[in-house]
Image (cartoon, rainbow, N blue to C red):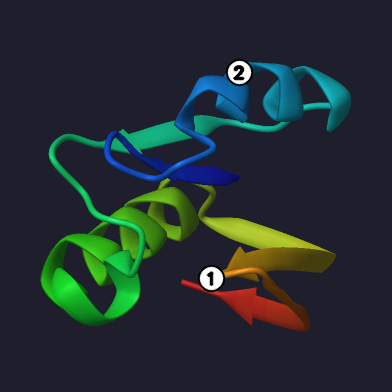
């Protein structure tokens, strides 16, 4: 999943990033600012929950999330 916000300075690169990650999905939050996770936590969380819910069983995935210029890597094994 590539989570994007329309007011993020690198918004124009979101589609290119999505193309570089096989089988990824691009989700864009309209009017979302750079600090989307803090400014719009409900929309941020909903986007992630919707992505996870769309895949009833996700075996083992490694997810890299770029939040405000810092990369956080999550590994999870989850059944929803």
Count the marks: 2
Which quadrant of the structure image shows residue 1?
A: top right
Image location of residue 28, percent across then percent down: 34, 34
Kindly indicate whether the residue at mark 2 contacts the one at mark 1 (C-beta within 8 angstroms).
Answer: no
Label 1 vs label 2, nearer the camera: 1
Which quadrant of the structure image shows residue 46?
A: bottom left
- Give the answer, above or below, for where 71 lies relative to 16: below
Residue 51, disc: none
Of residues 17 and 47, which is closer to you in this image? 17
Q: Is residue 9 left or right of residue 43?
A: right
- Give the answer, above or below, for where 31 lies relative to 37: above
Residue at the outermost front position: 9
Query: What residue would you read off at disc 2?
Result: 15
Image location of residue 59, percent across then percent down: 80, 64
Sort mark 1 into few (<14), some (14-19) or many (20+) by Cα contacts within 10 Å: few
**Residue appearing at x 69%, y 27% in the figure:** 18
**Residue appearing at x 54%, y 37% in the figure:** 10
Image location of residue 11, percent across then percent down: 47, 32
Say what secondary structure mark 1 lies in.
loop
Q: CA distance from mark 1 to mark 2?
A: 18 Å
Residue 68, disc: 1
**Residue appearing at x 21%, y 49% in the figure:** 32
Say what secondary structure mark 2 lies in.
helix
Earlier-in-chain disc, 1 versus 2: 2
Of residues 7 and 54, which is closer to you in this image? 7
- Give the answer, above or below, for where 20 lies relative to 53: above
- Give the answer, above or below, for where 40 lies relative to 23: below
**Residue appearing at x 29%, y 34% in the figure:** 6
Q: Is residue 64 left or right of residue 49?
A: right
């Amino acid at each position: 999943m590539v989570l994007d916000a329309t007011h993020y300075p690198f918004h124009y690169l979101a589609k290119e990033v999505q193309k570089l990650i096989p089988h990824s999905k691009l989700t864009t939050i309209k009017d979302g600012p750079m600090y989307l996770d803090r400014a719009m936590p409900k929309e941020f969380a909903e986007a992630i929950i919707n992505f996870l819910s769309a895949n009833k069983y996700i075996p083992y995935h490694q997810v890299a999330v770029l939040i405000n210029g810092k990369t956080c890597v999550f590994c999870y094994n989850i059944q929803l």
